[in-house]
Amino acid sequence: MAGFTLTPWEVTGDVDYSKVMEQFGTQPITDALLKRIEKIAGSMHYMLRRKIFYTHRDMDWILDEYEKGNTFFLYTGRGPTGPVHIGHMVPWIFMKWLQDKFGVEAWFQFTDDEKFLFKEGLTLEEVGKWTDENMLDIIALGFNPKKTHFLIDTRHAGTMYRQACRVAKKITFSTVKATFGFTNEYNIGEIFYTAMQAVPAFLPSVLASRNIPCLIPYAVDQDAHFRIARDVLPKLGYYKPASIESVFLPGLEGMAEQGKMSSSKKDTAVFTIDDADTVRRKINKYAYSGGQSTVEEHRKKGGNPDIDTSYQWLRFFEEDDRKLEAVYNDYKSGVLLSGELKSMLIEKLNAFLAKHQKAREKAAGKAEDYIFRQD
Ligand code: TYM
């Protein structure tokens, strides 16, 4: 797409989210849909209200079925290449809310095969280590172990591969090339991989021997996989998976400068295992500021919260609308200085991370309670 690249493996440039919606053929989350979700869920998640989750496919259908008693399940995933950053947490925080409010099952896929196949120099042992580490972050968010199931592609190959074959048989090489931009130089594992990412979208239906609607929360980078899955699954007799999709948490230097937060840009990402000093140092040094160059000028002209990373990050992590609005207005009018805004973000994020890190420590040894076992 003009001005930016957006694939499951590469996001660069300033993503134009309305263009993404148009080109992927997804629907906007309208106020009417928000009201409907709020009515059924009994409350409204701030990421929905703020349109961080801004687009979807078939959410209305998911709610229709839910109201008829045909409950959906949730599915999302993680490609374990390194430590989890706070951008990865965005779909998971939202998914936790969905699980609580709708009382539904949640499936997580750990794509160790994908990361091994796509990342130069990464061994299967290393991906295995990151799978174990990353599971702790998801457990730490408080998912209900009785209703949450982890699938690890290589470990659950016995269950998953049969289903992946059914999917793969319906996908041609030219579809994969056109959808992901692959060339003849890609290895054959990469070409097959999307079949594996489709599997959790219907595996619960296979296991239950009845069709269960599936809702997948993710940031827009993963969409290509599910465009293919939506094409293939009905051919196998299953529902098309529905989705609810978010914008990206930008890296510290801002979306225009460096695109989404990414694990490969370590200084401008915040990882869930970063300590308080590291977080402070990264934000003070790298957070793109929408402020003026001198205090006098800032007081006179005010700052621009819409391009200021600290403000943008607070939109993702400050749940209180009134607090957020006050920050916006005070920054815009020049009452709040850039340094003060950074301090607010540092405090907010470090409080969030301190709590998360404690929960993460407690999660050690609990993975087996979540890892799928077919009894
Ligand atoms: P991965 O590990 O690259 O990303 C995990 C999840 O985080 C989202 N994400 C972000 N969200 C907000 N801001 C960001 N800066 C940001 N960066 C990443 C991704 O959209 C994703 O939801 N192949 C997948 C793993 C996977 C999966 C799935 C993801 C398997 N099945 C189903 C979503 C849904 C991957 O490597 O994700």
Image: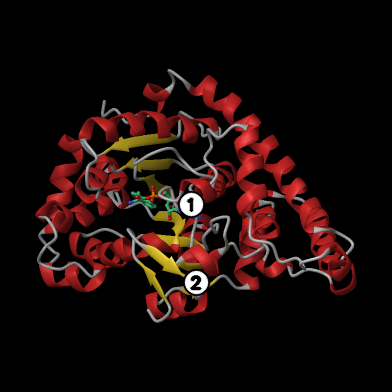
Which dot, 1 or 2, sits closer to the camera? 2
- Residue 206 vertical placement versus 65 (above, below): above
Residue that carries the numbered disc 2 in the rendered image: 14
Residue located at (20% from left, 53% from top): 193
Callout 1 amino acid: Gly
Instruction: State the SS at label 1.
Output: loop
Q: Nearer the viewer, residue 282 or 212?
A: 282
Residue 98 rendering spot, x and y as whole percentages: 55, 48
Ligand 1: does it lie within 8 Å of the C-beta at label 2?
no
Colour scheme in the image? secondary structure
Instruction: State the SS at label 2.
Output: loop
Q: Quadrant of residue 240?
A: bottom left
Q: Quadrant of the N terminus?
A: bottom left
Residue 129 in sight in this render: yes
Q: Nearer the viewer, residue 269 or 188?
A: 269
Circle 2 residues within 10 Å: few <14, some 14–19, many ≥20: some
Residue 69 circle label: 1
Residue 95 in sight in this render: no
Residue 375 rendering spot, x and y as whole percentages: 26, 25
